[in-house]
Image: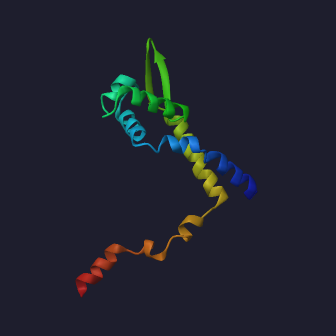
């Protein structure tokens, strides 16, 4: 395994566009609205579920679409939005694989010991005192 190639793959996946798209609370709310829906929704339907103007929702939808998080399909005069589930799953799996290939088993070893303490055991000890 060539670590340099793995690092390059990880850097490509850590594109700011994807992560920036998920930094705004309104965009997170849009993703939540769409995740609860059984079907694609129009900008009007999404805006009805949010405390912001339809123009704001429209702008956020474009950012999420451009980042690959949402799909936009035109149906007649309307555009219907849905979560790009397949692409998101592929991206997140590739990101996890790249992290694992680049730095296998590093993250658990770097955590402080107290993170692994059994809190229920500590509370039992307190009861015995």
User: Residue 1, can we see it?
Assistant: no
Is 75 placed above or below 83 here?
A: above
Q: Quadrant of residue 36?
A: top left
Quadrant containing the C terminus is bottom left
Give the side of residue 82 with respect to residue 106, left or right.
Answer: left
Residue farthest toward the top in the current orientation of the protein: 76
User: Residue 80, can we see it?
Assistant: yes
Residue at figure coordinates x 55%, y 70% from the top left: 110
Q: Quadrant of residue 106?
A: bottom right
Residue at figure coordinates x 68%, y 49% from the top left: 9
Quadrant containing the N terminus is bottom right
Q: Position of residue 23 (x, y in %)?
A: 46, 45
The one of 16 and 92 positioned closer to us in this rendering: 16
Q: Position of residue 55 (x, y in %)?
A: 40, 26
Q: Position of residue 81 (x, y in %)?
A: 44, 26
Q: Quadrant of residue 61?
A: top left
Residue farthest toward the bottom in the current orientation of the protein: 129
The one of 62 and 97 positioned closer to us in this rendering: 62
Q: Position of residue 93 (x, y in %)?
A: 57, 46
Residue at figure coordinates x 43%, y 42% from the top left: 24
Give the side of residue 41 with respect to residue 4, left or right.
Answer: left
Residue at figure coordinates x 70%, y 53% from the top left: 6
């Amino acid at each position: 395994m060539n670590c340099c190639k793995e690092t390059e793959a990880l850097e490509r996946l850590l594109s700011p566009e994807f992560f920036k798209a998920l930094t705004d609370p309104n965009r997170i709310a849009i993703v939540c609205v769409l995740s609860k829906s059984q079907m694609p929704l129009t900008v009007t339907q999404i805006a009805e579920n949010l405390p912001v103007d339809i123009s704001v929702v429209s702008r956020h939808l474009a950012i999420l679409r451009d980042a690959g998080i949402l799909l936009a399909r035109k149906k007649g005069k309307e555009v219907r939005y849905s979560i790009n589930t397949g692409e998101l799953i592929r991206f997140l799996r590739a990101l996890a694989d790249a992290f694992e290939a680049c730095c296998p088993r590093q993250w658990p070893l770097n955590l402080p010991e107290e993170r692994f303490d059994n809190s229920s055991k500590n509370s039992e000890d307190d009861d015995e005192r």
